[in-house]
Amino acid sequence: MSHVAPEADRTWIVGTAPGIFPFLSHGIALFRRPLAFLSSLPAHGDLVRIRLGPTRAWVVCHPDLVRRMLLDTRSFDKGGPQYDRLRLLMGDGLVTSRLETHRRQRRLLQPRFTPARIAAHTRLMGEEAEAVCRAWRPGQRIDVSAQMMALTTRVTGRVLLSDTLDEATGAEVRDCLSAVVRGLFVRTVVPVDAPFRVPTPANRRYRSAVARLHAIVDSAVAERRAGPPRDDLLGTLLAAVDGGDGAAAISEREVHDHLITLLLTGVETTALCLASAFSLLARHPEAEARLHAEVDAVLGGRRPGPDDLPRLVHTRRVVTETLRHSPPGWLFTRVTTKETELGGCRLPRGATVLYSPYLLHHDTASFPDPDRFLPERWLPDRGGGVRHGAMLPFAAGSRKCIGDSFAMTEAMVALAAVAARWRLRHPAGRIAALRPAVTLGPRSLVMWCAPRAQTPVRTPSRAPSSAPPATANPRAQDSRTAGDRDVDDA
């Protein structure tokens, strides 16, 4: 029996999006200007029909309806174009599995994501954050996106595989993941396979990255099979293959699929959240100053530990507001398992239904002035008033992201560790845009770093790589149009 939240007694509006293009239909608009297209839909209804090629789909625009859909997993299962493509990549892992196998998979993995387990990883997260930013130099121009990807790859690799991946292989994993997520979005919105069989550079890059990622995972599993057991997630999976620890036996293929899934979902999303946070903080000095004051008072120059997290209250608000303002997971699909009703509309079995955390997080009815970055939204007397379904960075219900607490902890620890040492600043000019792909965020965010103990570094005349004057005032782009003309990697 599904646990569905009761809907308010109201009349829902079901509409149709205008501007259908021949054959590809709304896929053109969704590909070329995805954020602007999604933001235009609530004007046409609470539930809006669109076309992706010859297929009808529905976009759920009202948070109450989104929540109802996510809680009713028996009627709305993981599926649709997005998950059809992801299954080709991830197999039958936790993210892409159907309802009938998901519960068994979650029971197997959940013990690795308990509060006690996550707390035990806090120092590991702090070590890796310090290792990344320790190599920075005053006035250095750094690719924040790449640095955060390096950090989250190392953290995720250690949690999943201990020290099985060496530095060079970890860098390969990072590059492969970047290439894969760039290519996935266009494969989701374009409803035919023919364009992706053409040997274009982008298609070759995608296929090569997928093949290499699978080969690295297979090699890691084989190496661990030949060695002693270890207390990490791969160890849990390998024990389950043999039916150990009282768990039902799983297949070697499931081990592979789970590792691919957790690498894909655990690395880039947190890295993009951190990159977005540093970009937003640089444009909001008051929020940044409060962050610096908090980490100085709580940490006093030492590495964050599990006991520090409850005291890093502003740090948590910064991460939460970043997830609202620039959610890495910005567009998802579900598929109806039977004929069902949503918002007064009868949906046939097999219908594709989309929802967008980005759209919900920028709804003015839920979040006044939604394009502003305001960590104060999450003060106790304000954040508690956010209605159910309006804030969904990790989904909801039984299919809620298993790693939500892990991701929050990792982001908080990394943000505090970097902010304790460095102040990051945008160069003069335009700020790196949010780049919509299968995830959303700045993928080439370059910033100058200045040590916290000093004022922002000015440009020395002899060093071309040093920081610009502190008076530089980069221009921020509207979050609804940033990156809209440049979906990453076609």
Image (cartoon, grey):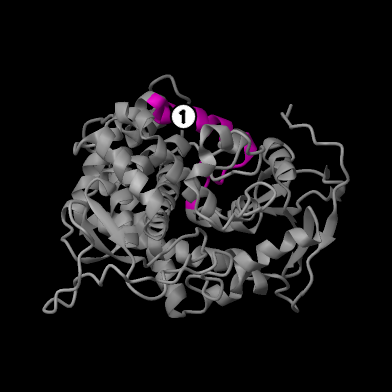
Q: Front-most of 333 and 450?
A: 450
Left/right of residue 199 with respect to residue 413 in the rendered view: right
Instruction: Specify the segment rendered in magenta.
Output: 90-115
When asked about the image quadrant of residue 370, the answer is bottom right
Please state the total of marks drawn on the protein image: 1
Name the residue located 79 percent from the left edge and 43 percent from the top edge.
338
Asked whether the viewer can see residue 164, the reply is no
Residue furthest left as drawn: 462
Res. 22 in view: yes
> What residue is shown with label 1?
110
Which is more toward the observer, 482 or 364? Answer: 364
Residue 285: quadrant of the picture: bottom left
Q: Answer above or below: position of 355 versus 300.
A: below
- Out of 341 and 287, give the one closest to the viewer: 287
Q: Position of residue 340 (x, y in %)?
A: 82, 43
Viewer-proximal residue, 340 or 230? 340
Q: Quadrant of the N terminus?
A: top right
- Our reading of the magenta stretch's main secondary structure is helix
Q: Is residue 369 left or right of residue 402?
A: right
Q: Is residue 147 magenta?
A: no
Callout 1: SS: helix
| Magenta segment includes 107 | yes
Q: Position of residue 211 (x, y in %)?
A: 39, 61
Three-letter code, disc 1: Gln
Q: Residues within 10 Å of mark 1 (few under 14, many from 20)?
A: few
Q: Residue at x 86, y 48 (%)?
A: 346
Q: Position of residue 47 (x, y in %)?
A: 78, 54
> From the viewer's perspective, is residue 371 above or below residue 334?
below
Could you tell me which residue is drawn at 39 percent across and 59 percent down? 279
Image x and y of residue 427, in percent: 32, 71
The residue located at (66%, 41%) in the rendering is 389
